[in-house]
């Protein structure tokens, strides 16, 4: 098939230019395009890719909607509770009895731990439907009380753990895993097919250089690759339901596309290089598959083992035991036997051994003491995770797939950095809320509707998307430079060995 | 003749640098994964054992306090490590490690190890199961794609057929040759696997581990055999080695990478789970509504009426203990319903994914592998349920102590000590028996057997019916 078509193509070139000028690159690219179109595999590949992209985009959309609904549910829940609390406080304005330690919203400590809890919500970034990333592993909202540990520990999203382990079929997956396979399927026999069919010798007998032929083949495939990458963006934006009017959405989308194209260019360049250095089509396919496995699967796994081996996070089991021991001693110091009982069961308190204000303050103090005691371990978690992340950032360049995956999820706002930033902002917000309540609890004053209105609200300070865009552009530039360098080197090598390459 | 063909095939493969290199690489990866698996297992097992002991000590040595306060103090339950997790970690990194068992609440398991890791953790985990499920089929494909197609291109197939050898014999010989070569290369890894098991299973019930290990081996053998059969079939029918390779690789990539993720989203949509927020809010609401009527005045009145007395102090037992226990029991209904629904949803999702194994055998194999290794979601859930039962027992013991300690309605003065703490037994967990696990994976077994029988039938049909001339030429598309 390919041989006949090439022959037809060269014949036509000859007819068009009787003086046997070398054919223009443009016409060669067009011929190459016809050849590719005539290949039987192209139609199924295109259909498969379109289906995969559409499926991935639809998945991204449904997941983003699921999360948006959850966040909306949080807002509704918060509004309902706060309005109930305001009314309840108004209704009890005439009640002058002493504050109770349990079930009494007039007691600021009770409200702070119960009906007045506001949510810290991480709003999904505009490109969230494009990559699920870590958004199924980390919580994107916290119901904030005044004790940090209790707040941050509570809600992991409900996802089938087998699904977490398998990963999701989103557009980032399509780009990182599937796009290279398609590019390789189209280009593993870039030159070797013609060599095996015997047409390469024929073509080279024309006044045309091997380098030019390869350039034409490469350009035709580059265009296909770019179209594929653009279609991912377009379908992702439309089917996935990216809100383009959101600030920064278009810029992020442009960065996303550039990263995809640069990543595709890398694989195309690799295919060219392998075609120059290697012999048979089957050998090329195996070499490229090896590269795919190495870059996409093995490289990251080995890096993972190294990273977690070099900077192991301390065991959570140990953390828990330390915190248990700390809370034992804190509670023992802080209170008498009976008081401990009330700490657990204030609703049964009948005779009041201490005021509700004292009880609230003491509870906070005990929580502080526990937090202080386990801080060395928790901060070790942080520092080890930071060290791991730095190591990953430095070594991710061993795998273009890792670089691309990190860039794409960061652009979508579902990468680890944004979630950790959210967690630290939420933690700081807990501090703000606590500073708000502390004097109110200690004073023993009643909680009022005005207080409810004054509870500080959380607003997420978007700090990671900007740097993510910058890093993504860098990733695109570096991958692009690597791709161009490989291609130029391969093409010049091909020209030097052109004599041998027909055999 | 079969032996001769097999020997030729095996020798050729073992001499082929490409195959040798890849297979060695994979054997090294497998051995590496098993080694890290053993290390990880032993560390985890030691840590969890120690944690379990110290949790018990914390419980027994707590200061004298009110029995119900002790129930609030509670204990922590730590998931024990499963010895076969060194082969297949399953969902271990995606489920919490421990739960706090306290009064009134069924708590979730907290701290999924994957949350304490970087993003590459999710990119690819290097475990023996992954090597077996993803990479070994690739080696099989590399060994089988040129079996006929390659010889056809070299022209030796025609010569071979000219000797009058029957295609069936050729198929059998080639299959035997490829299996032998693979066997030689996988043998060291298998030996390491057995050693790893011996090292790891020193402190568990050996018999069960060995039985599970053997079934696991059969599962993987069935999975591999299917690939061998499909590989030979495609190689026999494809016109060129190139086409044969591309077709097989497309199948491999779909099976190993596309299908598992595609199945996730299909299952999630077919059986949607609630968001954590909705789940928790619903539960809170139900706990409040069912709590009404069993505590407070209503209960007080009905108990007083039943005992024919007019004040709580004249009851023959302590009312608070009864009231607390009633409250607990109301909670059980809500927890059982809600957590039960969630577990049923996950189970339905996993069953769907096993059935999709009809299109991608990896799905069925993975499920069986996790199940036999004891690292699937079902067994996590089983542990969580056992922990919940233990919690209920513990809380009831404490509430009964409150009830029986003294008459009346006040509980403030109640104080207990270690004799009461020791009444709560240690939490000893027994993993579900092998039979139960197998019963849960009937679908996966059925699908895997279908894959094995189907692929063997395919290759047998081709071997029986293909004519020498078709075999010499390949099928024209």
Image (cartoon, rainbow, N blue to C red):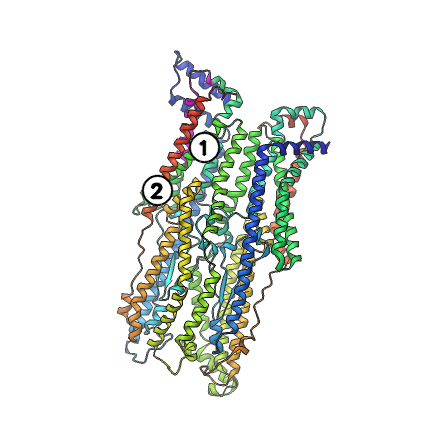
Q: Would you call the spot at circle 2 few (<14 residues within 10 Å), some (14-19), or many (20 or more)? A: many
Residue located farthest toward the top when viewing the structure as drawn: A19
Label 2's element? Answer: helix
Q: Is residue B305 magenta?
A: no
Could you say whether the residue bearing mark 1 is in a helix, strand or loop? helix
Residue A140: x and y in percent read 39, 56
Q: Chain of mark 1?
A: A
Q: Which residues are magenta?
A: A203-228
Measured along the vertical axis of the image, is residue B62 above or below residue A81?
A: below
Q: Residue at x 48, y 56 (%)?
A: B113
Question: Can the viewer see residue A175 in this picture?
Answer: no
Proximity of marks 1 and 2: CB atoms separated by less than 8 Å: no
Residue at image point 29% right, 73% down: A90
Residue B131 or B377: which is nearer the viewer? B131
The x, y position of residue A334, in whole percent, is 39, 75
Residue at which label 2 appears: A253
Q: Is residue A101 above or below residue A305?
A: below
In screen coordinates, is A355 left or right of B245? left
Spot occupied by residue A314 in the image (x, y as percentages of width and height): 46, 58
Residue A440 at x, y percent in the picture: 29, 72
CA separation in Å, label 1 and label 2? 26 Å
Q: Which mark is residue B219?
A: none
**Chain to which the residue tagged by mark 2 belongs:** A
State the image quarter where residue B26 is shown: top right
The quarter of the displayed image where residue A154 is located: bottom left
Which residue corresponds to mark 1?
Answer: A270
Closer to the chain start, of discs 1 and 2, is 2
Sort mark 1 into few (<14), some (14-19) or many (20+) by Cα contacts within 10 Å.
many
């Amino acid at each position: 098939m390919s041989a006949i078509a090439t022959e037809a193509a060269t014949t036509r070139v000859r007819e068009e230019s009787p003086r046997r000028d070398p054919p223009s690159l443009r016409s060669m690219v067009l011929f190459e395009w016809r050849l590719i179109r005539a290949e039987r595999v192209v139609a199924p590949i295109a259909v498969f890719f379109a289906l995969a992209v559409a499926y991935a985009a639809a998945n991204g959309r449904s997941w983003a909607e699921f999360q948006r609904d959850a966040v909306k549910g949080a807002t509704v829940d918060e509004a309902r509770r706060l309005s109930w609390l305001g009314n309840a406080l108004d209704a009890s304005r005439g009640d002058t009895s002493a504050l109770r330690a349990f079930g009494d919203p007039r007691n600021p400590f009770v409200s702070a731990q119960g009906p007045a809890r506001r949510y810290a919500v991480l709003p999904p970034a505009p490109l969230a439907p494009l990559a699920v990333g870590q958004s199924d592993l980390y919580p994107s909202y916290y119901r904030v009380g005044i004790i940090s540990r209790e707040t941050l520990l509570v809600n992991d999203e409900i996802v089938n753990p087998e699904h977490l382990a398998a990963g999701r079929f989103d557009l980032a997956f399509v780009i990182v895993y599937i796009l290279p396979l398609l590019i390789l399927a189209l280009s593993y026999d870039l030159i070797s097919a013609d060599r095996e069919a015997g047409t390469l010798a024929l073509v080279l007998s024309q006044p045309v250089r091997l380098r030019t032929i390869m350039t034409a083949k490469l350009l035709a495939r580059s265009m296909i690759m770019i179209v594929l990458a653009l279609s991912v963006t377009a379908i992702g934006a439309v089917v996935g339901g990216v809100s383009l009017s959101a600030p920064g959405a278009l810029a992020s989308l442009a960065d996303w596309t550039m990263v995809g194209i640069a990543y595709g260019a890398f694989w195309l360049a690799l295919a060219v290089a392998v075609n120059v250095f290697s012999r048979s089509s089957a050998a090329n396919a195996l070499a490229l598959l090896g590269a795919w496995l190495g870059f996409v699967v093995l490289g990251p796994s080995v890096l993972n083992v190294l990273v977690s081996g070099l900077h192991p996070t301390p065991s959570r089991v140990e953390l828990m035991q330390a915190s248990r021991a700390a809370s034992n001693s804190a509670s023992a110091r802080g209170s008498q036997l009976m008081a401990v009982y009330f700490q657990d069961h204030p609703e049964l308190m009948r005779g009041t051994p201490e005021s509700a204000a004292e009880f609230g303050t003491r509870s906070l103090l005990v929580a502080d003491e526990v937090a202080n005691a386990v801080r060395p371990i928790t901060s070790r978690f942080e520092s080890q995770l930071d060290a791991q992340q730095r190591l990953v950032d430095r070594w991710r360049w061993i795998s273009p797939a890792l670089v691309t995956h990190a860039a794409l999820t960061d652009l979508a706002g579902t990468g680890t950095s944004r979630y950790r930033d959210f967690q630290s902002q939420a933690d700081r917000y807990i501090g703000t809320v606590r500073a708000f309540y502390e004097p109110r609890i200690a004073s023993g004053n009643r909680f009022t509707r005005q207080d409810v209105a004054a509870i500080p609200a959380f607003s997420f300070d978007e700090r990671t998307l900007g740097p993510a865009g910058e890093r993504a552009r860098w990733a695109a530039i570096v991958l692009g430079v690597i791709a161009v360098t490989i291609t130029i080197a391969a093409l010049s090598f091909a020209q030097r060995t052109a004599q041998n390459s027909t055999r | 003749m079969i032996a001769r063909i097999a020997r030729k095939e095996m020798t050729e493969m073992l001499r082929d640098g490409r195959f040798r290199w890849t297979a060695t690489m994979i054997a090294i990866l497998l051995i590496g994964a098993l080694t890290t698996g053993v290390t990880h297992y032993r560390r985890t097992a030691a840590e969890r054992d120690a944690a379990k002991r110290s949790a018990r000590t914390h419980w027994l040595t707590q200061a004298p306090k009110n029995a119900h306060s002790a129930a609030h103090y509670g204990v922590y339950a730590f998931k024990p490590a499963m010895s076969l997790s060194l082969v297949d970690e399953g969902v271990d990194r995606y489920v919490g490690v421990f739960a706090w068992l306290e009064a009134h609440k069924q708590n979730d398991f907290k701290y999924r190890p994957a949350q304490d890791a970087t993003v590459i953790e999710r990119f690819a985990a290097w475990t023996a199961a992954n090597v077996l499920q993803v990479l070994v089929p690739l080696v099989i494909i590399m060994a089988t794609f040129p079996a006929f197609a390659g010889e056809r291109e070299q022209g030796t197939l025609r010569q071979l057929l000219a000797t009058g050898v029957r295609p069936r014999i050729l198929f059998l010989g080639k299959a035997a040759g490829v299996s032998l070569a693979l066997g030689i290369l996988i043998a060291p890894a298998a030996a390491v696997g057995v050693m790893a098991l011996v090292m790891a299973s020193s402190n568990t019930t050996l018999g069960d581990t060995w039985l599970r290990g053997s079934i696991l081996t059969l599962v993987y053998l069935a999975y591999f055999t299917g690939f061998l059969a499909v590989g030979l079939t495609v190689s026999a029918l494809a016109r060129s080695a190139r086409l044969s390779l591309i077709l097989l690789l497309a199948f491999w990539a779909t099976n190993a990478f596309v299908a598992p993720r595609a199945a996730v989203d299909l299952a999630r949509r077919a059986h949607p789970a609630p968001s954590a927020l909705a789940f928790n809010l619903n539960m809170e609401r139900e706990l409040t509504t069912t709590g009404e009527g069993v505590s407070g005045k209503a209960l007080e009145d009905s108990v007083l009426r039943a005992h024919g007395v007019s004040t709580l102090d004249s009851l023959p037992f302590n009312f608070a203990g009864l009231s607390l226990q009633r409250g607990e029991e109301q909670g059980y209904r809500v927890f059982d319903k809600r957590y039960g629904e969630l577990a049923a949803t996950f189970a339905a999702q996993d069953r769907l994914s096993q059935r999709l194994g009809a299109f991608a055998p990896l799905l069925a194999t993975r499920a069986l592998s996790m199940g036999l290794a004891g690292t699937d979601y079902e067994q996590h859930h089983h542990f969580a349920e056992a922990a919940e039962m233990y919690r209920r027992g513990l809380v009831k013991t404490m509430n009964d102590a409150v009830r029986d300690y003294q008459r009346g309605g006040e509980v403030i003065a109640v104080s207990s000590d270690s004799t009461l703490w020791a009444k709560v037994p240690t939490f000893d967990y027994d993993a579900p028996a092998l039979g139960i696990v197998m019963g849960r994976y009937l679908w996966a077994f059925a699908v895997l057997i279908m894959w094995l029988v189907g692929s063997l039938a395919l290759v047998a049909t081709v071997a029986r019916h293909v004519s020498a001339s078709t075999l010499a030429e390949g099928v024209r598309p």
